[in-house]
Image: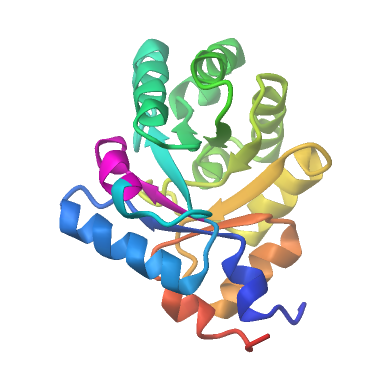
Amino acid sequence: MTDYTRAQVAALVDHTLLKPEATASDVTAVVAEAADLGVAAVCVSPSMVSVAGAVAPAGLAIAAVAGFPSGKHLPGIKATEAELAVSAGATEIDMVIDVGAALAGDLDAVAADITAVRTAVRAATLKVIVESAALLEFSGEPLLVDVCRVAKDAGADFVKTSTGFHPSGGASVHAVEIMARTVGERLGVKASGGIRTAEQATAMLDAGATRLGLSGTRVVLDGFRPA
């Protein structure tokens, strides 16, 4: 396993708060913690972007989710949600695909979904959440590969493993390896969902992840050596 430093890993982290019960004061606290930890971004619900933006220091990116967590929203809804989040100050969007459409083999619908959001937020970094654990459980590796290719062709900047809310599970080393092998030369790979230790984070990075979505960020970073 690679011997990463705390600072190296922090620079790849989206410090995340997406609990439905999160309040404005919770988001303010998360932004303060993110600044203290030196992470790349905070990831919050669209309704909390303006709250995060009001207190975020320069250099801390604000990410918002779209179509979260089910992905069963109409493409126009996801696109509008993403557009409003960017208008409020988000510079990164993490959108959820319609996993059911993917499992049904309707990759054109998946592509249209992603394209709608990409068109709405042309200047933002777009991460496409594919729910890799569900795709692998219900269909297998070929579909995960196909969905990642669709995301790439539709203009995504990253493919992301999971919302962290799906019962099939979150990120896995196996999924990250597949995703990185499929798109790694052109896109980033964000591992998110269930990463709670430095050992798990290291395994994801070694597998090809270029960004990590963490909620217990401090505990994970405390497991890495100082620079």
Residue drawn at the location 64% of the way across and 39% of the way down? 158
- Is residue 43 shown in magenta? yes
Q: Give the range drawn in magenta.
A: 41-53
The rendered magenta stretch, by its main secondary structure, is classed as: helix
Residue 78: percent from left, percent from top:
39, 21
Quadrant in which residue 149 is drawn? top right
Rendering colour mode: rainbow
Quadrant where the C terminus sits is bottom right
Q: Could you tell me which quadrant the N terminus lies in?
A: bottom right
Give the x, y percent position of residue 173.
65, 60
Residue at image location 43% in from the left, 37% down from the top? 90
Q: Where is residue 196 in the image (x, y as percent from the top left)?
A: 46, 72
For the image shown, how many numbered marks are present on the structure? Answer: 0
Q: Position of residue 17 (x, y in %)?
A: 32, 55
Residue 198, quarter of picture: bottom right
- View extreme (front): residue: 58
- In the figure, is residue 77 to the left or right of 95? left
Q: Taking the image as drawn, is residue 72 in sight?
A: no
205 or 55, which is in the foreground?
A: 55
Out of 215 and 109, give the one closest to the viewer. Answer: 215
Query: Going 38% across and 46% down the picture, which residue do you hit?
Result: 166
Residue 53 visible to the viewer: yes
